[in-house]
Amino acid sequence: MKTKRAISVYAAMIITAGTLAGCSGADSAITVISREDGSGTRDAFTELVGISDDDTDNTVETAEISNSTAVVIQSVIGNENAIGYISLGSLCDEVKALGIDGAAATAENINNGAYKVSRPFIIAVREDISEPASDFTEFIMSSDGQAIIEEKGYISVSDKGTYTPSGSGGTIVIAGSTSVAPVMESLADKYKELNSGVTIEIQQTGSSAGITSTIEGACDIGMASREIKDSEIKQGLISTVIAMDGIAVIVNKENDISSMTSEQIKSIYTGEIVDWSEVLYE
Amino acid sequence: MNKCKEKLMHGIFLVCACISAAAVAMICFFLFANGLPAIREIGTADFIFGQTWKPLENKFGIFPMIIGSIYVTAGAIIIGVPTGIFCAVFMAKFCPEKIYRIMKPAVELMAGIPSIVYGYFGLMAIVPAMQNIFGGSGKGMLTASVLLGIMILPTVIGVSESAIRAVSDSYYEGSLALGATSERSMFFVVLPAAKNGIMAGIILGIGRAIGETMAVVMVCGNQSILPDKLTSGIRTLTANIVLEMGYAADLHRDALIATAGVLFVFILIINTLFSILKNRSSDQ
C-alpha cells in the first residue's frame, strides 16, 4: 500500500512538474545513453554507481545503446539533453565530464579515492606465452611502461624497476577491448622504438573476443576492460592488472550541470529521473 | 591436347562453382550447429517470443528485435519503394538524355557507397533533423526507416528500370493509339506489364533493408523494447548481433549466433519469394 501511494505521489509530482514546465518540458527530457550488455565499461559503470544489484542490471529499457565510445561521444555532442559514460582516457574537449559526489573526474582523484567510478584494465596470456610477448608484458609493468599509462590519463598500478631492452624479435598479436586499445597502441609504439626487431599487431575486437582468441591461440595477449571470468581462467589464462581507468559521466557542453551525486546518476540510469529540471532544482 | 585443356578448364570451373555452394553450406552448418543447441537450451518459445533481452541475467528473448527488423524494413519500403519506382519510370521513359547521363551513374554510385558511410550521414544529418522536428534523441524507428529507404533506392531503381525497359514498346504505342495520354499509358499499361520485375526489385530491396547492419546500428537507438511510437528507439536483429558480439561469452555468444540463424531464415524466405516471382515472370 505504501509503495502504491509513493508511486501515485511521484506520478503526481511528475505531472505537476510537466505542467509547470509547459511545452518546453518535453525539450529537456533526458536522453540516457548506455553501452551494450557485456561491455566492460557498462559492467563496471552499473556496478560502481549501484545501477545493478545482485547481478540484476536495472538500466532503464528506453536507454539508447551504443557499441563504441566514439558513438557515445558523438551522440552527446549532438544532443543537448544527452548523458553518457566513457573511459576517462577517451575524454575529449567537446563534451563535459561531470564531477561525482563532489570530486572531479581526474586521475589524481581516482588515485586518492575521491572519485569512485574506476575499473581495472587487464591483460590475459596463456601459460605457454611466447618469448617476445612475455618481454612486452614485462615492459608494460615496468616503470617506463607505467609512465606511458599515466601520461595517457590512466592510473599506474605497478612500480617494478626500469625496463632493459632484450633485443628480442618476432611478432606479437594483441586483441581485445576497445577501451584498452588506445593506451596499448602507445605502449606498443614505445616498445618498438626500444626493440626494433619486433612487430606488434593490435586488433580491437572487444574484451570477450580478445579473451577467446587468446585461449584459442589466435593472439598472444588479450586485453579486457572487465574482470576475467572463472570459466576463462579455467582454460589456462593468467591475468594481470596493468592500469586503473576512471569512467567519466559526460553531458553536452550546453548543459548547466557540472556535478551530480552518484545517487542522482543512478536515478537517471534507472529511469526514476527523466527530466533535467528534476536534477537542476533538487 | 585440346581435350586435355578442355578437361582442365572444366575442372577449374567446377571448383569455382563449388566454392560458393560450399561457403553457403558451411555458413548454414555453422549457424545451426552453434545456434540450435542455444535455442534448445533457452527454449524455442522463450527465444522467439520472449520480450526481455537481458543476456547477463540469462533472459534471451528476441521478439522485440524481430518486430524491430520488420518495422524498420516496412518503413524503408514505404519510403523507398514509391520514390524508387517513380524514379525508375522517369529514367526509363521521361528523362532527357542529358540528365540521364548524370542520373544513371549517380544511382549506380549510391549502390557502391559503404553502409558505414550511410550510417555516418544518418548520424550527422538525419538524426539532428529528427531532433529538431520531434524532440528527444532523434534516433529511432523513423530515422532508421528514412535512412534505409534511401539505401534501398539503387536496388529498387535499377531492377525496376530494366523491368520497365523490357516491356515491349508496342504496349505503350498501342495505348497511345487508343487515345490514352502518355502518363496514363505509362502507369496503367507499361507498369502493370512490368509488375513482376518491379516486385523482384522490391524484394531485393527488402533483403537489403533487413540485412543492413552498420548504418542502422548508428541511428536506431538500439533499445531492445517493443516500440510504441514512430520515434521510439528499436533494435534490429542485425544490430543485436553486431552490438554484443565483441563482448559476448558462453551462452550469450551462442544466443547471438542463434539470432543470426533466425535472420538467415528470414533471408531464405525472402529469396524463395524472389525466385518464385522470377519463375513466374519468365513463364509469361
Image (tube, coloured by chain):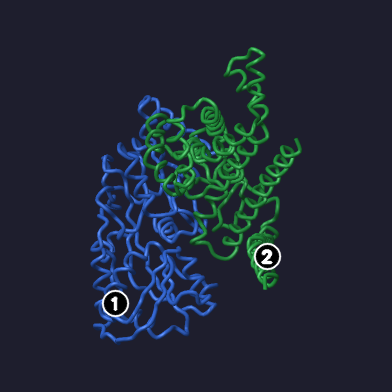
What's the residue type where badge 2 is placed? Leu
Q: Are marks 2 and 1 on the same chain?
A: no
Q: What is the C-alpha distance between the residues marked 2 and 1?
A: 49 Å
> Dot 2 surroundings within 10 Å: few (below 14), some, or many (20 or more)?
few
Residue at horizontal 66 percent and vertical 29 percent from the top: B168
Which quarter of the picture shows residue B86? top right
Q: Residues within 10 Å of mark 1 (few under 14, many from 20)?
A: many
Identify the residue at image location x=49%, y=59%.
A38
Say left or right for B261 vs A269: right
Q: Which residue is mark 1?
A: A191
Residue B42: x %, y % from top left? 66, 57
Q: Position of residue B21 (x, y in %)?
A: 67, 61
On what subunit does the disc labeled 1 rest? A
Q: Colour of chain B?
A: green
Q: Write down the quadrant of residue A119 in the picture.
A: bottom left
Q: Mark on residue B204?
A: none
Q: Amino acid at mark 1?
A: Tyr
Element type at mark 1? helix
Q: SS of the residue at dot 2?
A: helix
Q: Which chain is blue?
A: A
Relative to B232, does residue B246 appear above or below in the rendering? below
Nearest the eye: A30 or A19: A30
Q: Position of residue A231 (x, y in %)?
A: 55, 72
Can residue A263 be seen by looking at this rendering? Answer: no
Q: Is residue B261 above or below residue A28?
A: below
Residue of label 2: B14
Compared with A25, A38 (above or below) is below
Residue B275, position in %: x, y?
70, 44
The reply, left or right, for residue A243 in relation to residue A233 is: left
Question: Callout 2: residue from which chain?
Answer: B
